[in-house]
Structure formats: structure tokens, C-alpha cells
Image (cartoon, coloured by chain):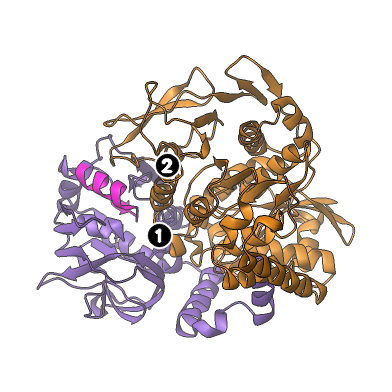
Chain colours: A purple, B orange
Amino acid sequence: MAEPVSIALLYPELLGTYGDGGNATVLAQRLRWRGIPAEVVDVHAGEPVPRSCQVYVMGGGEDAPQALAARELRSGRALVDAVEGGAAVLAVCAGLQVLGNRFAGEDGTVHDGLGLLDCETHRDDGPRRVGEVVATPDPSLDLPELTGYENHGGVTTLGPGARPLARVVVGHGNDGGDGTEGIVSGRVIGTYLHGPVLARNPALADHLLASVLGPLEPLEEPEVEALRKERLHAARHPHMHMPQLGSGWRRLLRGH
Amino acid sequence: MPTVDLPLRTRVAALAGRAIADASRLVGAGEGSVIGGRVTLAIDQRALGLMAAGHQSVAVSGTNGKTTTTRLLAAALSSRGPVSTNSAGANLIPGLVSSLFRGRAGAAVALEVDEGHLAEAVAAVHPTAVVLLNLSRDQLDRFGEVRRHAADWRLALAASPDTVVVANADDPLVTWAAGACQPDSDGDRCGVTWVGTGQRWRADASACPNCGSRIKWSDERSERGGVQWACSSCPLARPRPDAWLEGSDLVLADGRRLPIRLQLPGRVNISNAAMAVAGAMVLGIDPGRAVRAMSRVRAVAGRYQVLNVGGVRVRLLLAKNPAGWAEALDLLRPPPTPVVVGINAGVADGRDPSWLWDVPFERLKGRLVVATGERGRDLAVRLRYADVRHTGEQDYRKAVAVAATGLNGAKHPDIDFVANYTSFQDARRALTSGRGGG
């Protein structure tokens, strides 16, 4: 392949609050390690979205930047055209909400989304959903357990025919109370998981890449496996991963 | 502390808190400042405001640089007389209370205040001045959005109209937070001293905190230091600074030019010093005298301290979040000097270390990096994707030994050790006590 595989990172300055830009790094590096040239294209607010990228990545962000990102994306059809042309999309947290039909801001204002995912997001009075998540992917995806960290105020409900990305084992996920986490429609994947999600779940990264490039050879990565094992265990046994009592007391007395 | 003027209840509360703090320190349980402050507040909820009353006071807050700026400011104030300050970094309300236990009559008060608690502190103390440094992403699991801090600050400052605000003109969130009361004819908040710090971190102010539209940054340096920025839709824009940095010179609006010469490294500390000078000036300190006093500060709560660990000189640096790391990467000695990086994700660090992916660790290529701390595995994966040569080691002292061996076994007598908040404290303890930890 002469032309590098192009990964668009959409509005990192608006949807980059939670480290989700790392997902683009993960995708590009996993291709390069296999000898496939890859590039990350940062797309900033005010610039046209390229139609020719193979994968588009969007992350989480704060309320006002999220609304701004939705306005920018809706002012053109580039992302919708790219998806119709076969591109894959990973949208995290605020990004997931923007790709849905509608989403509500913190003040309750309802914004139109892109309608690429059949879901909508509202706000409830409950506390933000914050913490480690373990979720079992939809069987059709044939992926190992997902691990990530969620931090969101929005509640996403899926449309009648929509397929969730996973079922929650630990944590909240979409949390309309139906036990679902994220949403999948063809090559478009939405999730609430940070970490970033592709750093903690390389199989999901390879799934996205394979959906546009075809099968990829496996990579050997003991460090990532060690991290996954630690995080999956920490999520299931949170009490074992609290700071030790001794140092906790010292911190309490010293200031934190 | 002019205890004579205090209500009996407050006097008893302060005495009890001070006794508990002393006892805590005597049994080696820590500085005792937090537990002592809690005891005082349990007896008298209004203790902070009452104990601070009658003193000139400055509150310093922001995401990064609070401790250092407060230390520099306290040094400047000390050139004139006694100062009460929370130098141990206990920056929540109990820590502020205990910093006043030993305040002498007429002492000036310099308080480092956690950004999530500044509104409460301002409401209690009504300080003479507040110094607003910067706001960026940090501990998002605990605080949610960055903008919330700015909104809270804005409300608290509007309710404390006699407080003089010293604010970083190069941070849009801080500018919005500071501009709390009605603009005067120049378009500035009455009583704001704007400082052009030349801050480079912009990633948390892409959307206007006032109206949500896009903030535009000019490509050119503006007239008074820094880079011009303005909202694309509402009037929020970089205010005209009253003091600004040109290189390491602080220039005042009256034309005076004060070279800032610090023993603390890095451009970021020049910015911190500029903010501290402006804060000291509000309390009537001559800026030249302030700068001279600051030049004598060598280390701040262990930061920049050099420790000898088994014959290896280890320089300790603190970096808690992407904005802090952007500055820390500039301070590191060039490759191949090895670096140990310690990452925890305790409550005080933020439980989610996803922010590691907002740090350009790619810049560490060409040297060995040793990943340590409770979340060393997250860091190791980040370094793998950054193509940085690295290894993991849980024990802090062993991590130093591994780093000193470097790539290819070449011995390095000097290394840098960068850690986030609680990892820094753990590392400092482990490396000074001779125990491993981590």
C-alpha cells in the first residue's frame, strides 16, 4: 500500500479532554508495527472535515465545546459521506452523543446530533457516572472483555433496532437501566469508555482497522496484557486496589 | 493572631486545633495541619474568616503552580514582616485554618488554595488579593468540567468586591473568572491587575467560557507579551496587561523593568514569579524588593530538590497533568539522561490516568525511561505507543538504580525523577528514608 492509511482525529481541542486522542495514536501505531504506513490527520474546528480518511476518531469533551463540535460537524456532510463510503468511526463519550440523533447539554438545551447512531442522550438529576467499567462485547463482534473508565453526566438510550457495543458487568455504561454500554452501527462504534479505550482494548482497535482494511496479523504485547489484567481485576475488586491504610492516613494528615 | 479580639468560641477552637496539630506532629503522624484545622472547624465553623480578619491576606489558586507561587509570594512578604502561610501544601479549608494558628499580630497571610475550594475560601476570608494562575484539565473524575471552577470563582469574586484580583491574561478561563463585576469604561473589571505570563497551554480554552463559541489565537505576539486571543463571537478577549513578561524581565505599565533571576528552573517559574510580584504589589511591597526576596527561594516542598540515592543524584520534579507536563518536559536534561516517571491514580491525583495520552511522551525518545508508581503499567503502555525505550519497576529506589544504569549499561550520575502528586510524595519519602515503597 503506497498511500498511508489516514486516521482523522476530529476536533482534538474540543473533544480531547479525557485523553481520547490517544485512540488515534493507537490505531496508527498498530498499523506501523505491522509495516503498514499510517498517518494521523488532526482536524480543527473551523476547518473542513476531509472525506477521504479511512478511520475517524472523536473523544470526550466539556459541554460547550461538545455543542460547538456538533455545530461544526452538522455544517457539512463530510463525515456522513465518509461513513457511507465505507469509513470506520470510533466516537467516545461526548463524541458518541454527538453522533446520535439528539443530545442534551448540561443546562438541558437539546442539540441535534448527526444521526449516524440510533440513540439519544438526555440528562438526569443523578450524579455523574464515574469509575472503572468492565463490559462483555456483543457476541457478533467476537471480542474479549472491554475495560475502561467512564465519566459522564449524560444518559443514552438506544433506538429500538440499535445494537449495543457491550453489556455492562461493572460500572454504568449508557445507563438507561438496560445494562448496555455503547452502540454499534456497521463500522461506526460509540462508547463511554476512556483509558483510552483502544489502549486498554487492542482487539477493539484491530477490529476497527480490519473493518476497513481486511484481516490483520496479530501482535505480541505482554505489557498491554498486564495492564488489562490489572484493570479488569481492579474493577472487580475495588477494595483491593485502594491505597494502603498507612499511607492513606499519612496523606489525610498531611493534606489529602 | 490577635486572639484578644476573637470570640471565646473561636479562641477555644484555635487552641484545641493547635494542640491536636502539635500532638499529631509529636507522634510523627505528619504535619498535623489538616487534623488540627478540622478540630478547629468542628468547634467553630466560622473560624477561618474570624482568624483571618484584620490581616492583609492573599489567596493563590489555579491548577498548576499554586505551591511555588505561594512560596515566592510568602518570600516577598517576609521581606517586610511576619507571614503566615500553608507551606506544607495543605490547601483545603482545614489546612488554611491551621496556617493561622501561629500567626502573629500584623502578620500578612499567604494562602495556597485548592482550585475547587477557592470560592469557599474567598467567601470566608474576603482576602485583600487573590492571585489566579491558570485552569486546565486535572482530576476530572472528581471535579467534572474545568469550566465549573471558573464559574465558581466568578461568582465568589463578584460577592467579594473589595478583593483585588491578580489574573493571568493569557488564560481565557482565568480571564473570564476574574472579570466578575461590571466592566468599567476601559472594559476591565474594576480592581483587576492583569499579568501577561506568556502561558502556552491552550488546550482547555478552545471554546469561549462565556458563550461557547470558538476562541481565536493570533499568530503574532501581542503588544504586551503573550499572544493575542479573542472570542470569535462575544467581547471576551485578552485584556491589556498591567504587567507582562519580556523574556525573563517583568515589565510594569509605568515602564519599570525587573529582571527575574530565580534559583528555581524553567520558564514556568518565571511566570509564577511574575504573578507573585503582582500579588505582593497589591499588599504594598516594592516590586524590586519582591524580586530580590524571591531569588533566594531554592526548593519548594521538595520540588527541584536534588537527592543523593546510593551515589546517584536524583532531581525531583512534580508534574500532575498535561499542562504541568508540557512545562516539565522542557526542564528535563537532554537525552541520554535517564528519567524515572512515577504515576499514581489516588483520589488526590484523579482516579483516571487517561491524561497520560495528552502528554507528548514521544519527546522522551533517545533515553531510558523507568515507569513506576501504582499506575506504572498504564504509563508503560503509553511509552510503548510513543516508541520510547522503557522498563517498569515498582520499587522507587530500584527504579532509580535501573535508570542510572541507562541504555547499554552506561552509568549516569545524574537523573531526573518526575512524578504526579501522591507518587511524588511516596517517592520523596522512599528516596530520603532508604525504604523502597511504591
Please state which of residues A241 and A256 is positioned toward the viewer in this rendering: A256
Residue at the spot x=35%, y=42% of the render? B209
Residue B420 in view (yes/no):
no
What secondary structure is marked by label 2? helix
Amino acid of disc 2: Ala
Amino acid of disc 1: Gly
Please state which of residues A178 and A128 is positioned toward the viewer in this rendering: A128
Residue A3 shown left or right of residue B398 in the figure = left
Residue B393 shown left or right of residue B387 in the figure = right
Q: Position of residue B397 (x, y in %)?
A: 79, 67
Of callouts 2 and 1, which one flags the residue occurring earlier in the amino acid sequence?
1
Which chain is indicated by disc 2? B
> For residue A56: magenta?
yes
The stretch in magenta equals A55-71
Number of numbered discs visible in the structure rendering: 2
Residue at the spot x=41%, y=70% of the render? A148
Residue B402 shown left or right of residue A205 in the figure = right
Residue B177 numbered mark, or none: 2
- Circle 1 is placed at which residue position? B144
In three-dimensional space, the C-alpha distance between marks 2 and 1, rounded to whole angstroms, equals 17 Å
Residue B293 shown left or right of residue B371 in the figure = right
Residue at the spot x=29%, y=47% of the render? A64
